[in-house]
Image (spheres, rainbow, N blue to C red):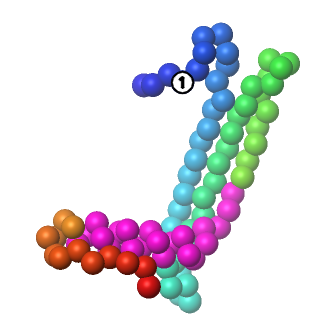
């Protein structure tokens, strides 16, 4: 465990999650990400913040290229990876 806080200061807590699934009509599938953040307030309570977003197809395309590169690297196939 790594502690990134000053002693005597309550930490900010962050939880994250993501999902992906193949989806007909979407060339790179469908993905979502979400965050929950609990931040300390001056009144000794925590404020809770939530955010979620659909992952853009452009970002999923980049992930697909990276996954293809990793697969080729493991199989010792000559590496030529680029987004197209």
Q: How many marks?
A: 1
Q: Which residues are magenta?
A: 52-72
Q: Which SS type dominates the magenta stretch?
A: helix
Q: Is residue 27 above or below residue 48?
A: below
Q: Residue furthest right?
A: 43
Q: Which residue is mark 1?
A: 4
Left/right placement of residue 40 relative to residue 82 reads: right
Q: Is residue 81 above or below residue 52?
A: below
Decide which of 69, 46 is in the foreground and name it.
Answer: 69
Image quadrant where residue 44 sits: top right
Q: Residue at x 44, y 69 (%)?
A: 63
Decide which of 63, 35 is in the foreground and name it.
Answer: 63
Q: Position of residue 45 (x, y in %)?
A: 80, 23
Q: Inspect the magenta stretch and tell me whether residue 57 lies in it.
A: yes
Left/right placement of residue 72 relative to residue 68 reads: left
Q: Residue at x 50, y 85 (%)?
A: 27
Left/right placement of residue 38 relative to residue 83 reads: right
Q: Is residue 76 above or below residue 44?
A: below
Report helix, strand or loop for mark 1: loop
């Amino acid at each position: 465990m790594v502690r990134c806080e000053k002693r005597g200061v309550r930490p900010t807590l962050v939880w994250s999650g993501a999902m992906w699934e193949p989806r007909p009509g979407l060339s790179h599938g469908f993905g979502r990400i979400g965050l929950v953040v609990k931040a300390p307030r001056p009144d000794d309570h925590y404020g809770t913040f939530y955010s979620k977003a659909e992952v853009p197809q452009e970002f999923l395309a980049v992930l697909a290229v990276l996954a293809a590169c990793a697969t080729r690297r493991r199989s010792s196939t000559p590496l030529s990876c680029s987004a197209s």
